[in-house]
Image (cartoon, helix red, strand yellow):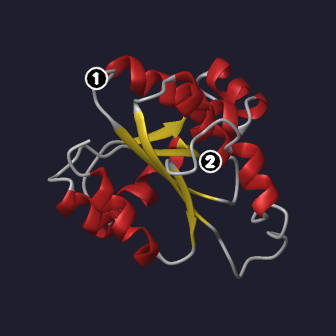
C-alpha cells in the first residue's frame, strides 16, 4: 500500500505518527526505513528526564495525543494535503476524524486497517464504532480495509487533489 501511494502520488512527504514512547525509536527506525518510504517519526515524549513529558504520556490518551500532533503538522504544513493511514487497535479513527472535522479540505483521505486475528477486537472493528467515529465526515473520505489492495482505486482518486 505505502509503495503504491508513494509511486502514484509522486513521492509525497511521509510522517509516521505513533503513540509509542520515543525511547522505542532505536527499534522503530530500522523497521520503518526497511519497510516504508522515508519520513520523520513522531513519538510520544515519555522520559524520567522530562517530568512534564512523562506525566503527559501517562495522562493523555492516544486520541488526544494523535490529535495534538496532527494539529502541529497542520500548523507546519497548512497548505499541504494529507492522507491519514492508521488502524483499528486504538483511537486512529476518532483522532483522524476529529482532525478532518477541524480542518476540512486538509485531510484528503483516511484509511483505517481493520486489525483481525487479535483477541478482543470485535467492538473496535464494529461498523457501529466506525460510523460513530466518522460522524460528519463524508463517506468518500474514509475507508476501512483489511487487504491493502482494497484501497488502490481510492488512492487513484487522490491523484491531483
- At a point 57% along the width and 75% down the height, the residue shown is 146
- Quarter of the image with the N terminus in it: bottom left
Residue 85 visible in the snapshot: yes
- At a point 41% along the width and 77% down the height, the residue shown is 149
Q: Nearer the viewer, residue 79 or 24?
A: 79
Residue 52 is situated, as x and y percent measured from the top left of the image, at 66, 18
Q: Is residue 122 above or below residue 42?
A: below
Residue 47 visible in the snapshot: no
- At a point 76% along the width and 62% down the height, the residue shown is 127
Residue 139 is situated, as x and y percent measured from the top left of the image, at 58, 50
SS category of the residue bearing label 1: loop
Question: Is residue 90 left or right of 155 when viewed as pictured?
Answer: right
Residue 15 is situated, as x and y percent measured from the top left of the image, at 36, 43
- At a point 41% along the width and 30% down the height, the residue shown is 105
SS category of the residue bearing label 2: helix
Q: Which residue is mark 1?
A: 79
Q: For the view shown, which residue lies furthest in the bottom direction?
A: 117
Q: Which residue is mark 2?
A: 92
Amino acid at each position: 500500500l505505502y509503495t503504491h501511494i508513494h509511486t502514484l502520488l509522486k513521492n509525497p512527504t511521509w510522517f509516521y505518527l505513533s503513540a509509542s514512547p520515543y525511547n522505542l525509536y532505536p527499534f522503530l527506525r530500522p523497521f520503518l526505513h526497511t519497510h516504508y518510504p522515508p519520513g520523520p517519526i513522531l513519538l510520544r515524549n515519555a522520559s524520567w528526564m522530562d517530568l512534564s513529558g512523562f506525566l503527559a504520556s501517562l495522562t493523555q490518551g492516544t486520541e488526544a495525543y494523535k490529535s495534538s500532533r496532527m494539529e502541529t503538522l497542520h500548523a507546519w504544513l497548512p497548505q499541504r494535503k494529507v492522507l491519514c493511514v492508521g488502524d483499528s487497535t486504538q483511537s486512529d479513527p476518532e483522532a483522524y476524524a476529529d482532525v478532518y472535522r477541524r480542518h476540512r479540505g486538509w485531510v484528503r483521505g483516511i484509511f483505517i486497517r481493520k486489525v483481525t486475528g487479535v483477541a478482543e477486537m470485535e467492538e473496535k472493528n464494529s461498523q457501529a464504532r466506525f460510523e460513530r467515529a466518522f460522524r460528519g465526515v463524508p463517506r468518500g473520505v474514509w475507508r476501512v480495509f483489511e487487504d491493502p489492495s482494497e484501497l488502490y482505486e481510492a488512492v487513484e482518486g487522490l491523484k491531483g487533489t
